[in-house]
Amino acid sequence: MNGRKPTKAEQAYINGATISVGCVVCNILGYENDAPPEYLAFHHNTDKGSIEPLCHFFGVPICGVHHQGHENAPKGEPIRHKNYAHFKNKVGSDIDLARFVWERLPLDTQDLIGQSQNIWSFDELIERDEQNRNH
């Protein structure tokens, strides 16, 4: 992962998201979603990058096929880094995917993030991110 090292709370988010959601695209499309966590990439929201405050909280776990593609990928499959317009049309924007993940985080992960960051929901994350950007 390029960028800054995740904080303890961000690492808890990454772990919770990867374990509870798996590949967010496979999950949304209703595909079998049993790839081991080590086979998933953690895609950072393009607008947030991987160095800004809170950036890791906007990332999502995504399998290799849906992240950068694979030569055996079925035709028409949404691939984030090959055709973002098609990807967004099929499964949603990066922000939509982050919201999807946040809504499925385990309660212990939500509690850890809330207690350490005072961010208890995706809407609070968006609000805090906007506050950070305005200062």
Image (spheres, rainbow, N blue to C red):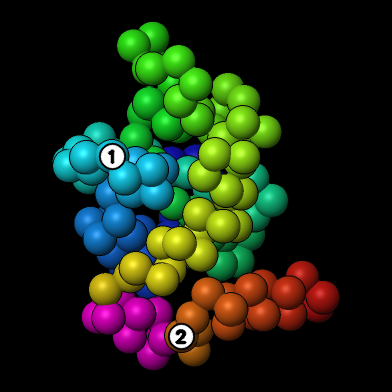
x and y percentages locating residue 90 in the rendered image = 54, 39
The answer to whether residue 107 is above or below residue 77 is below
Specify the quadrant of the image occupied by residue 41: top left
At horizontal 40% and vertical 49% (from top left) the residue drawn is 28
Specify the quadrant of the image occupied by residue 116: bottom left
- Mark 1: amino acid: Tyr
At horizontal 33% and vertical 85% (from top left) the residue drawn is 111
- Mark 2: amino acid: Trp
The answer to whether residue 129 is above or below residue 78 is below
x and y percentages locating residue 50 in the rendered image = 56, 50
- Location of the N terminus by quadrant is top left
Residue 1: mark in rendering? none
Q: CA distance from mark 1 to mark 2?
A: 29 Å
Q: Earlier in the sequence, mark 1 or mark 2?
A: 1
- Mark 1 neighbour density, 10 Å: few (under 14) some (14–19) many (20 or more): few
At horizontal 61% and vertical 31% (from top left) the residue drawn is 86
Label 1, secondary structure: give it: loop
At horizontal 45% and vertical 15% (from top left) the residue drawn is 75
The answer to whether residue 40 is above or below residue 22 is above
Specify the quadrant of the image occupied by residue 109: bottom left
Residue 120: mark in rendering? 2
**Residue 124 seen in this snapshot:** yes
Q: Is 117 positioned to the left or the right of 109 in the image?
A: right
Q: Find the residue positioned furthest to the top.
A: 71
Which residue is label 1 attached to?
31
Start-end of magenta stretch: 107-116
- Mark 2 neighbour density, 10 Å: few (under 14) some (14–19) many (20 or more): some
Of residues 23 and 129, the one nearer the viewer is 23
Q: Which tag is nearer the camera, tag 1 or tag 2? A: 1
Q: Is residue 31 highlighted in magenta?
A: no
x and y percentages locating residue 105 in the rendered image = 33, 70
